Image (cartoon, grey):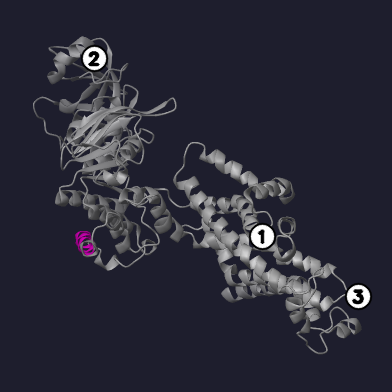
Amino acid sequence: MGALSIKQVMKRYGAVEVLKGIDIEVDDGEFLILVGPSGCGKSTLLNIIAGLDTATAGEIWIGGRMVNQLSPKDRDIAMVFQSYALYPTMTVRENISFGLQMRKVPKHEQDEIVARVAKILQMDHLLDRKPNQLSGGQRQRVAMGRAIARDPALFLFDEPLSNLDAKLRVEMRHEIKQLHDRLKATIVYVTHDQIEAMTLGTLIAVMKDGEIRQFGRPQEIYNSPADLFVAGFIGSPSMNFIRAPVVRQASSVGVQLTSAAGTFHLPMVHLADQLAPWVGKELIFGIRPEQITDTVVSRHVNGFAHQRSVPIEMVEPTGPDTLVIMQLNGTRVVSRVRPEQAPSPGSTMDFVFDVSKAVFFDPQTEKRAA
Amino acid sequence: MAEQLRSQTAGPQLAGRIVIYSLLILVALYYLMPLFVMLTTSLKSLDDIRSGNLLSLPKSVTLEPWFKAWGEACTGVFCGGLKGNFMNSVMFVLPAVIISTLIGAMNGYVLTMWRFRGSDVLFTMLLLGCFIPFQVVLLPMAQTLGYLGIANSVAGLIFVHVVYGLAFTTLFFRNFYVTVPGELAKAARIDGAGFFTIFWRIILPLSPPIIVVCVIWQFTQIWNDFLFGVVFSSGQRQPITVALNNLVNTSTGVKEYNVDMAAAIIAGLPTLLVYVVAGKYFLRGLTAGAIKG
């Protein structure tokens, strides 16, 4: 039995189904990310795990115990909230020890725990301050300290970084990741930010409309998305989706792409079998920006890389890379090239299409076709 | 250039200041005038009042009217001054204020942090209570007090004022608590705190600004109330407002304006005191919702 299992959890508000049967199994020490656009039910699911909300149906197991009937305090969890939810009238020390006090931990043990937590998070000097005397990042740290002091079986984070500015967010992200490594804690973390999901998670559940669209390791979700939504949601800039006819040419099957300069063929040697039934029909061809690049950095390997010349429409420098935008089959397609290779708009450039990680979706069902 | 700018703006600014301050002083004088008349009249002897005019200062200051108003003046046939009624008022105003404030705080806490099905409807219904005129509830209240066996008693008056004040106190606290993040209560629940612990340890310590507002409002309302006092109490149990009315209306030959004035000031003193002591918190509390912690 893992640290957390969620079995067929459903939530209905009247006729509205917020969660439509969620199943998740998480082992000790995993960092599970619930990610999805707002309104996908991820926060509701977290609240149900915490016991702050009740499921209409289904079971929640934490550390091998069914906790459906237990109140939040008996579930052996700690939660970090988006607004931090620090008690404003208490000092940092009192904030951290409040939970211990409630559970009647002896005073000297409380002091030890507070000291230990303060050391872990390097905030000894903040202990006697009130929350309104702290900066956003410090408040965030205190909120985590309160959770650590509890030493729970399961940590719950509800969009903890969304109130911070961009720079601080990156810093705190590192800190949370370090914390996870150091404490070997099991964490469930809700976010709508796919970068947070990719960088922090050891497991990601991508949610939409109260369902889990895909559940797996970050790299697996990135490389092999289950459907069009997941493919588009994970990754920034997001994956290019090009509607393209599947054609057989010579011995291989591939897609036909048309730019202003003319039509070309991209063979998909490794996907020939999967694509065979689609010959003569259209599929959505998915390729990430970093898989369309300039000729310098690309590795011509295994016959997956194909050089093609395409007129370019727009150039967006980001610093480390420059995004070069072209039109293929009437769709804007983003490529990622080295800044010094970026040409001026209107000219034509040689691109290398690496199709080894190309994916295909059925335009009707939006499910993965190949 | 800068010099020029300054001289250009300084002129109109000064003129504006003068206008504003003279207006303010004028308005302040207008509002202070009755108090001035009351104070000076209460310190004059009857001869002094007859010979001088309303605004003249007393020829010789006497505290006699104050002592008379406090201890000897006649209300109806009883001649023991206002001191008994003053204590009556204190005896029911303090408990009524404290109880209605506490219940209001609890109501506000439940309506914001422990929402339940229909809690918004309940709140709206409570709000309607703010618009019910005193006169409407007189008869049903009299009957209720009779049933409860607390008619014509201090407990009865406390009950009336608590019930009538609840709508207001609940409104105050509810509107204050909606600005408090609900996640606070959730965090406390996960920390293991129960309903009352969260209220006492987390929510109530946040509330001094709104408690002050509520106490001032309730104290003023209840202390100054005349109608409930005159209807639901009688004789020696009457509050000071009713006694003041009786005192002024009781005349044995000569109308003692100085005693009337002293009595009126005595009756108004506690509310005045509350405003002076807590006034700055009152303003702070009224705007508390607008300021982010």
How busy is the neighbourhood of tag 2: few (under 14 within 10 Å), some, or many (20 plus)?
many
Q: Which mark is residue A246?
A: 2
For label 1, the residue is B221
Residue in front for this viewpoint, A283 or A202 = A202
Q: Examine the image and state in which quarter residue A292 appears.
A: top left
Q: Position of residue B187 (x, y in %)?
A: 35, 50
Q: Chain of mark 1?
A: B
Residue drawn where x is 28% and y is 59% of the image: A97
Residue drawn where x is 64% and y is 55% of the image: B156
Stretch in magenta: A111-121
Residue drawn where x is 30% and y is 20% of the image: A366
- In the rendered image, the vertical position of residue A184 relative to residue B93, given as above or below: above
Residue in front for this viewpoint, B28 or A330 = B28
Assign a secondary structure to mark 2. Answer: strand
On the rendered image, what quadrant is the C terminus of chain A found in? top left
Residue in front for this viewpoint, A28 or A286 = A28
Q: Is residue A115 magenta?
A: yes
